[in-house]
Amino acid sequence: MGLFDIFRRTKNEAPTTEAKRQVDKQTQGRLLPWLGTSSRPSYRESTATLRHARDESRNLAQNNVYAKRGLQLLRQGVVGPSGIRLQVQALNNAGKLDTVDSAAVERAWYTFSKKGNLTVCGRWSLTDVLGVIIESVCDREGEILIRRHRGPHNKFGYALQLIEPDHLDENYNGELNNGNIIRAGIETNQYGKPVAYHLFESHPRDTTGGGKRVRVPADEIWHLYIPHRPTDLRGNPGLASAAFRVGMLESFEEAAVTAARNAARRVEYLKQRHADGLDTDTDATTDAAKLVDDELGTMWLLPSDLDHSFTDPKHPTANYAEFVKAQLRGISISTNNIYNDLAGDMEGVNYSALRHFRLQQVDYYRTLQQWLITDFLTPLFEEWLPLALLSGGITIPRPDASEFPLPFKPQKYSRHKWIPRGYEWVDPQKQVTAEILAIKAGIKTLSDVLAEQGKDFDEHVARLAAEREVLAAAGISIEGITDALLISTNTDANE
């Protein structure tokens, strides 16, 4: 039988149950494991091994150096050191930017985003929360739950609670009398829209919890995950796809280290002769091998009736480095990281190749930034704004140093945009030259270039004008500073 003959049958031949078993058996072996498909509903497909996959991903994230590095690169690349900034663009009656009111809302948002205000536990800032969300959803758990609390948790009357997905029982399914359906702990209506989430009050593996569930309305929960099928209800951890290669790499490295240690310890054997031969201080009649020296290697003294040999394992082999690179490349692909960044390997890297992969990586980071803005930050701001206005948490300073609350005009202040982190290039000098040419040719605007660097045009112009004013007052020319920097840069490059 040929390799693919198992898929062929005559026109009128129906596959028997036994034949189907044989197909399943042959297609799920070592050669073609990817042909072992399933036609189960997506919620069953994703939840069948969800808890195990989540545990594996958490174990890798905690104990494997490459998985930890991947999470670090992900948080660093998407969120960065300052998170994603809010810029309010409220307009006055004349249709011009109302800088005073906009600045008041931005100050209040900044205060709300700090530790002690944003979450009910008081331990997280907005930058922290963004990092946890991106790590949890993309790699570690595949999803995260955020509950919104309205009440006196802070002066804005609004706070968040981060909930691990373990609280949402993936094995809780059922049909309710009102026609709603519970799948993987999520109660939905007839159209599949979430109505409520059935959460454990405490972590299910907490021995003091008792496993009691509570029904939380869907309008209090943000369930963040990235679906891959139209009917997906739960998210799957991305690190699980790298677990196999990580396991192979760890096993191979352990075996290589063991073999290398054995190779470093050359073992020699000495055989006793009869009395007319070699004379030793040891008992020549012993039947057991005796250890002579274990300082610089190992030597064993053998009885006269035993032969001897040398052990000299040849390790590590030349294939070690290539095998490690192959596995790390696979892990890099699974976790959407550049191999050179994940492995810390810059051998043989040139500017063109690194720039190519960097552009792909930046596109991935920007996609995740937009997902954070669309699915989390914008709904958060739109829900926080009217509550903050009603509570008097957004104020404008008076000339006498007192403050008064901003009028309740949420429609006016809701006009905004988000500024995520920007990215520097592999060779900044070449990139800046290219950007200048693009601006001159009309292909890009200065706003486009600044946005790619995570900067706002209005803020940049204001800061630039302020700097030039200070320099002019001091009698310093901005051109003189830039010329000096260019000379210094060219000197360093030539050296």
Image (tube, grey):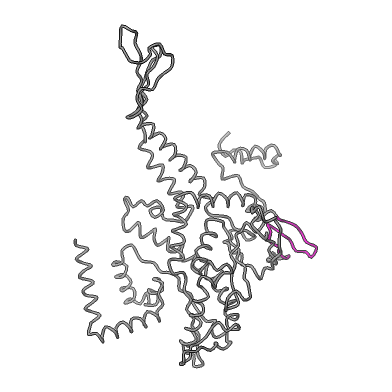
Q: Is residue 286 above or below residue 75?
A: above
Between residue 445 and residue 10, name the one nearer to us: 445
Q: Is residue 184 above or below residue 436?
A: above
Q: Is residue 161 left or right of residue 326?
A: right
Q: Is residue 468 above or below residue 372?
A: below
Q: Could you tell me which residue is drawn at 51 percent across and 73 percent down? A: 113
Between residue 33 and residue 282, name the one nearer to us: 282
Q: x and y percent of residue 169 in the render?
A: 67, 56
Q: Could you tell me which residue is drawn at 39 percent across and 55 percent down? A: 341
Does the magenta portion include 179? yes
Q: x and y percent of residue 365 in the render?
A: 46, 63
Q: Is residue 264 left or right of residue 3?
A: left
Q: x and y percent of residue 344 in the render?
A: 37, 52
Between residue 261 and residue 330, name the one nearer to us: 261
Q: Quadrant of residue 167?
A: bottom right
Q: x and y percent of residue 246 in the render?
A: 48, 46
Q: Which residues are magenta?
A: 172-189
Does the magenta portion include 86? no
Q: Where the N terminus falls, by quadrant? A: top right
How many numbered marks are there?
0
Q: Is residue 153 above or below residue 392?
A: above
Q: Could you tell me which residue is drawn at 47 percent across and 49 percent down? A: 64
Q: Is residue 84 left or right of residue 461?
A: right
Q: Is residue 177 left or right of residue 420?
A: right
Single out the residue that lies furthest toward the right.
Answer: 177
Q: Could you tell me which residue is drawn at 23 percent across and 82 percent down? A: 477
Q: Where the C terminus falls, by quadrant? A: bottom left
Single out the residue that lies furthest toward the top.
Answer: 276
